[in-house]
Amino acid sequence: SDYPPEQLRPALAVLDISPALPLRLLNLLRWAADYYHHPLGECWQQALPVLLRKGEDTTASQRAWRLTTAGLALPENALKRAPQQQHALGLLLREQTIAESHLPALNIKRETLRALATRGLAERIEIAALASSAPPILLAAMALTPTDEQQSAIDTVAKSFGSFRCHLLDGVTGSGKTEVYLRLIEMALGRGEQVLVLVPEIGLTPQTLTRFQQRLPTPIAVLHSGLTDRERLSAWRRARSGEAGVVLGTRSAVFADCPRLGLVIVDEEHDGSYKQQDGFRYHARDVAIKRAADWGIPIVLGSATPALESLHNALSGRYKHSVLSARAGKATPPRIDALDIRHQPMTDGLAPATLRAISETLGQKNQALVFLNRRGFAPTLLCHDCGWIAQCRHCDARLTVHSQERRLRCHHCGFHRAMPHRCDDCGGNQLEFRGPGTERLELTLTQKFPDTPVIRIDRDTTSRKHALRDKLEDVHSGEPCILVGTQMLAKGHHFPDVTLVVLVDIDGGLVSADFRGPEKLGQLLTQVAGRAGRAEKPGRVLIQTHYPDHPLLASLLRAGYGEFARQLLEERRARGLPPMAQIALLRADSRQLEEAEQLLANLRADLQAHSRDIECIGPLPAPMSRRAGMFRAQLLLRAANRPALHRALFQLCALAENHPLARKVRWSIDVDPVDLS
Ligand code: ADP
Ligand code: ZN
Ligand code: ZN
């Protein structure tokens, strides 16, 4: 240091010999902190495993023994009257350090070493762990011969190895995108590079991992939210040491340190789980693109239903667009029909034609998948005497009936209460369960099809470790069964024996107020439908709806997602919405709604006094105006371009930090918001 010694404090401890994050990653985090207007320290926390922040070393270490200076000075036979100690001394003189884990093999007892330590002759130290014994590599699967479209996508990406290029791999479900990834990964490994593969939170199925393990001759470091802190640190270290050629992980894996990174893949790039919804609200796909640009390497965004942002960039030529238009192998696209359920006698949400179709499917020894994005037994508990509806005490939301555990649960704040026997308001006992949830569908289908296993997959049935894996194994046995589940089923799974997919209720998406509503519905519909007929058996999709002629639905069914998405882009352009404009959301939460709105109104006035090129909409109550006891208001900011938006956001942060109300009102900025609720 250039400072005089008396101005310096002594170091308390040296945590790491080398920096925990290399400069390039630090710079990426600095960029993200600026871009998302979030404190840098909290961004760093996201990038580092918890145990590292608690003082563990960046490299794995293990205990080992060596001789002290006094020990080293001993003549070779100095301890011959204590044969055990002499044995240890001899080996320590020869080996210099001996890992504790090797002691048994060398026939050295730990007591012996302790005795030497007491005499000041030996000491125990920490040394870097030797590269862990890598798990056996299975390499069971053979590469498939790529189709022409696959080959052309592979060639296009391969041409950009060694330099930054963003590729959109736009391939219908079942078109063999994963096969393209595998080929590219093999090529990158051959170049001595590491590959970072991002997958959505729930898409990280054991199936994907197995497929990778069976094909890639390298250890794979897996990073997802289900790991213990210890497992996470160990995977992080294997990425950092370069031992793992592939790092496969969910959102935060985008910050994993990979010293030889040569390729990034973002699978299902449209998926909402890439956007963190609280605190540091980064979008892992967008950070990944920035990372690839900084590192000067190619990145592949893969999806059957690209986000409008990505599609826009591909159509405008900023991204390279590779299309896989046909399903791989012998699979054909499923037939999709809207099923008009108006005036139909429904059985717990299922129309007669739906039940007939399920019955036929099972009769042909195939599997059926019934999709409903609502867990629990029923979304509403209603009093038939007076109309009372069970509401959450802390949120602007209804409580969901969970019948097996006989409780009412709020899906927004975690509040729960025992199922009441009588109405809270009038005391009547005519309480009714209104509307279906997955739990109810499971029960109904079990009663209708008593000889067929009904497998429910949602957050409630898969919270136990390995529960999802076990359930998927049942499905993959290929026996006839009915799968019931939420969007956990919509993503990435490959169910070769499912030939019928039923969407129980999508009407909410058709009438959504969120400007992203149609895009999300189109993606969900296409992804769920894509689970049908993925092998040699043709598939069929039934969409139950009260609006069979709705223009959105009609255009999606007639023209498919690609055409539908292009129409939505035109609409966004006409309405001045992303990706043609840039938006950010300023949220304010408070015990008093007035305070939250007041803060936003003041900030809006201050901001507009400063900048002309920003448009403010609000303050308005959030679509869910109260959550977990807090009132929520929001202000939407819109600008024609990024620099204008970011100038305004920097001003806004400065204004908000100094505002007197900011002490009572919790505020946050969400750049490129995905969820406007
Ligand atoms: P996606 O990731 O696009 O949904 P997958 O990579 O899972 O598609 O492929 C779907 C199915 O097609 C898988 O069973 C896969 O083994 C098979 N498949 C992929 N590419 C080929 C190919 N070139 N020839 C034959 N089968 C293929
Ligand atoms: Zn009542
Ligand atoms: Zn609640």
Image (tube, grey):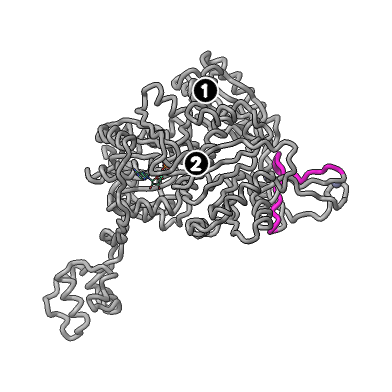
Relative depth, front residue between 406 and 31: 406
- Residue 432 appears left or right of 677: right
Relative depth, front residue between 457 and 174: 174
- Residue 350 appears left or right of 653: right
Q: Residue at x 44, y 24 (%)?
A: 312
Relative depth, front residue between 353 and 570: 353
| Mark carried by residue 530 | 2
Magenta residue check for 669: no
| Mark carried by residue 12 | none
Ligand 1: does it lie within 8 Å of the C-beta at label 2? yes
Looking at the picture, which amino acid does disc 1 mark? Answer: Gln
Residue 584 in picture, x, y percent from top left: 53, 27
**Distance from Cα at disc 1 to Cα at disc 2:** 21 Å
Where 427 sits versus 659, above or below? below
Relative depth, front residue between 112 and 239: 239
What range is drawn magenta here? 386-405
Residue 626 in picture, x, y percent from top left: 68, 37
Farthest-out residue, bottom: 81
The residue under label 1 is 567
Looking at the picture, which amino acid does disc 2 mark? Answer: Gly
Question: Predominant secondary structure in magenta?
Answer: loop
Residue 392 visible in the current orientation: no
Specify which label sits upstream in the sequence, 1 or 2: 2
- Residue 67 appears left or right of 608: left
Query: In the picture, which quadrant includes the C terminus?
Result: top right
Looking at the rendered image, the disc whose residue lies closer to the viewer, 1 or 2, is 2
Residue 93 in picture, x, y percent from top left: 15, 71
Question: Residue 84 is drawn in which quadrant?
Answer: bottom left
Query: In the picture, which quadrant includes the N terminus?
Result: top left
Ligand 1: does it lie within 8 Å of the C-beta at label 1? no
